[in-house]
Structure formats: C-alpha cells, structure tokens
Image (spheres, helix red, strand yellow):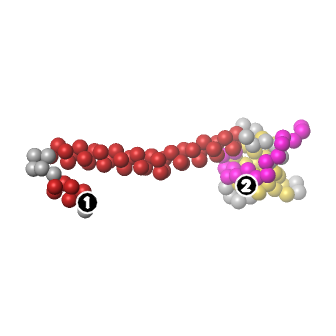
Amino acid sequence: MIITLIQQAAPAGGAGTAVGGQILMLAVIGLIFYFLLIRPQSQRMKKHRAMLEAIVRGDEVVTNGGLIGKVKKVTEDEVVVTLGANQDVKVVRSMIADVRNRKSAAND
C-alpha cells in the first residue's frame, strides 16, 4: 500500500525512477535475506564441521537418530561408537549431531 502511494505521488515523467525504486527494494530484500537466513546458516554449518573434525576417542556423541554413545575409534569418514556393553556401531561422521562431555584424548 505504501509503495502504491509513493508511485502515485511520483511525477508523470518518472517512469525511470519507479524502476530504480523497484531495483533498490529488491536489493534491500536481498540484503535482509542474506543477514537473517543465509549468513547464520553458513556459520552454523562451519561450527558443525569444526565440531566433527575435533571428535576424538573418549568423546560422548549423539547421532542424528538419537543414539548416545562413547567414541571408541575414529577414522576419516566413520566413527565407531560404543552404545553399551559390547555394542559397537559404525556411524558416518556427518551423521553425528552433537558432542557431549568432551574429554581429553584417551591413551592408545
């Protein structure tokens, strides 16, 4: 409604200013989307990647499926997680949602 009032108040020969105003409005909306949606999401992804790279033996992890266990072995793409007594599960590293109770690296 405000935009239509501004366009109606523009002079009759101002067709070029209306297009410039629309481009400016699109640029402002693009900046809002960047700062409210795109930038925070990329920062979360960067933190999650750093967390996955820092996983070491002895950490307690939560998988995306909700399983909680202790890391037994870490390879490049997979992590072996102990869920209970003699229950070892291989988990793809990217499917780990959170690291809880970070411990220092265990002696091998």
Residue at the image position 23 percent from the left and 43 percent from the top:
20
Quadrant assignment, res 19:
top left
Q: Position of residue 108 (x, y in %)?
A: 89, 37
Instruction: Examine the rendered structure and indicate whether residue 53 appears above or below residue 97.
Output: above
In the picture, the quarter occupied by the N terminus is bottom left
Residue 72 on the magenta segment: no
Q: Disc 2 or disc 1, which is closer to the eye? A: 1
Callout 1 crowding tier (Cα within 10 Å): few <14, some 14–19, many ≥20: few
Nearer to the camera, 68 or 5: 5
Nearer to the camera, 31 or 9: 9
Judging by the rendered image, the residue that carries numbered circle 1 is 2
Q: Is residue 8 visible?
A: yes
Q: Position of residue 106 (x, y in %)?
A: 87, 41
Callout 2 crowding tier (Cα within 10 Å): few <14, some 14–19, many ≥20: some
Identify the mark at residue 62; answer none if there is no mark.
Answer: 2
Residues in magenta? 93-108
Residue at the image position 43 percent from the left and 49 percent from the top:
33
Mark 1 lies on a secondary structure that is helix
Q: Which residue type does callout 1 highlight?
A: Ile
Q: Position of residue 27 (x, y in %)?
A: 34, 45
Q: Which residue type does callout 2 highlight?
A: Val
Mark 2 lies on a secondary structure that is strand
